[in-house]
Image: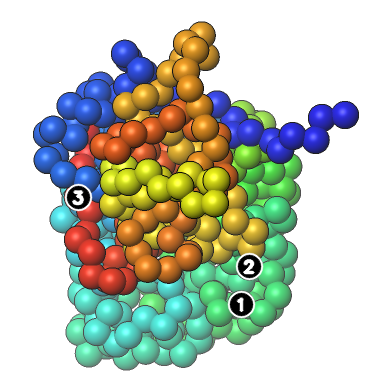
Amino acid sequence: MNNSPPEHVPLTQFAIQDNCLQIGGIPLTRLLQRIGTTPFYAYDRHKITQRIGLLREHLPTEIHLHYAMKANPMPAVVQHLAGLVDGIDVASVGEMKIALDTTLPPGRISFAGPGKKGHELSCAIAAGVVLNMESEQEMELIAQYGECLGITPKVAIRINPNFELKSSGMKMGGGPKPFGVDAERVPNMLMRLHALGLDFLGFHIFGGSQNLNAEAIQEAHTKAFQLGLQLAEHALSPVQLINIGGGFGVPYFPGDQALNLPIIGENLRHLVPEVKRQLPHAQIVIELGRYMVAEAGIYVCRVLERKLSREHIFLITDGGLHHHLAASGNFGQVIRKNYPVVIGNKVYGTETETETETVSIVGPLCTPLDVLVEHMQMTKASVGDLVVVLQSGAYGLTASPTSFLNHPIPIEVLV
């Protein structure tokens, strides 16, 4: 019986040449020379383009793709994606300003999230951005600000559905939630919305995120469309938008398998025609963040010291949880698991005999939480070698406590 722990699924999105990882067609060591310092994040624009192409290939042509900017708001990444997707979803005025700097018209930008402040609502209305309303109170405020500005706000209702996306890393719907309006409250809200004279577009139904279970996503899509059609019966104007959220996951941990996108697309091909028949004016939107960018990014830090403590080797680096909270296991993990990590300038092929060792990789912070790798077998590394955390294009730098202990903030590049 094999009791060995599961290993990471081989990740082959980046080429390896002369035992060195390539990103954007550039050897990692050359990229470091170009940047001049570690740590840094690097995102491969070609990989992002490929991922959008994969989605276009497998999803029905009627599906509009929106990018959830919270996954990675680096302006260069957003600018690149703006030429590939049909819309962008933002969650703050700061993100909205980045989106407005792209070539996308404001009407293809949506603003979601609870607790929007008055000035945020006012800025979004003035810009012509679509506001995904999270509550009845927010709806009343939007109407007031619209009247003051002399502008009719464009709005959609974010729904807290009466179901959840099973097997999700983070559940965003079902049960009591701070996000959206409980589905059963929406009919009354629609009546009030009409009386307020808002420009109603449709519904945003988001059930969860980071899901690798294609059957669970299929079920959520089916239920989201059913709910959208039911709620549309209460609308007093044609529904122009059904956003069924996202939730497509990527493999991070040992045992994870890549999402089966083709069967998700096949299910949507069965569902979409009926939705279009009943709501002929509605755009059908899938909103993805992580799935578009996570696998196109890496985080790179440098080994500063090899330290032996009670027969265990620690590689101490100039990076850590302050730059990559998710890889440290402190961004929603219940039981800490290792991200896929390699020594980027020593990525030996399987046919090459190479010395390996079991190590932990830690950062320079004075806390036991600052761990990037825990007891993992890796190529033997020396001082100066480059530790690379894969799957780092989403929820990396901007999801991390960069001010903790006041170390320098890493550089980000799109190559």
Residue lying at the far front of the rendered structure: 310
2 or 3: tag closer to the N-terminus: 2
Residue 127 lies, with reference to residue 23, above or below; the image says: below
Q: How many marks?
A: 3
3 or 1: tag closer to the N-terminus: 1
Query: Where residue 380 sits in the image (x, y, percent)?
Result: 43, 30
Viewer-proximal residue among 331 and 188: 331
What is the crowding at mark 2: few (fewer than 14 residues within 10 Å), some, or many (at least 20)? Answer: many
Question: Label 3 is placed on what type of residue?
Answer: Ile
Mark 2 — residue?
173
Q: Residue at x 46, y 90 (%)?
A: 137
Viewer-proximal residue among 54 and 181: 54
Quote the CA–CA distance across marks 2 and 3: 35 Å
Secondary structure at numbered mark 3 = strand
Mark 3 — residue?
411
Residue 393 seen from this side: no
- In the image, is 304 to the left or to the right of 358? left
Residue lying at the far top of the rendered structure: 351
Mark 1 — residue?
177
Query: Where residue 276 sits in the image (x, y, percent)?
Result: 57, 45
What is the crowding at mark 1: few (fewer than 14 residues within 10 Å), some, or many (at least 20)? Answer: few
Question: Label 2 is placed on what type of residue?
Answer: Gly
Do the CB atoms of the residues marked 3 and 1 lie less than 8 Å apart?
no
Residue 284 lies, with reference to residue 197, above or below; the image says: above
Question: Quadrant of the image for the C terminus?
Answer: top left
Q: Residue at x 55, y 26 (%)?
A: 10
Secondary structure at numbered mark 1 = loop
Do the CB atoms of the residues marked 1 and 2 lie less than 8 Å apart?
yes
Residue 183, by quadrant, is bottom right
Question: Label 1 is placed on what type of residue?
Answer: Lys
Query: Where residue 340 sits in the image (x, y, percent)?
Result: 50, 38
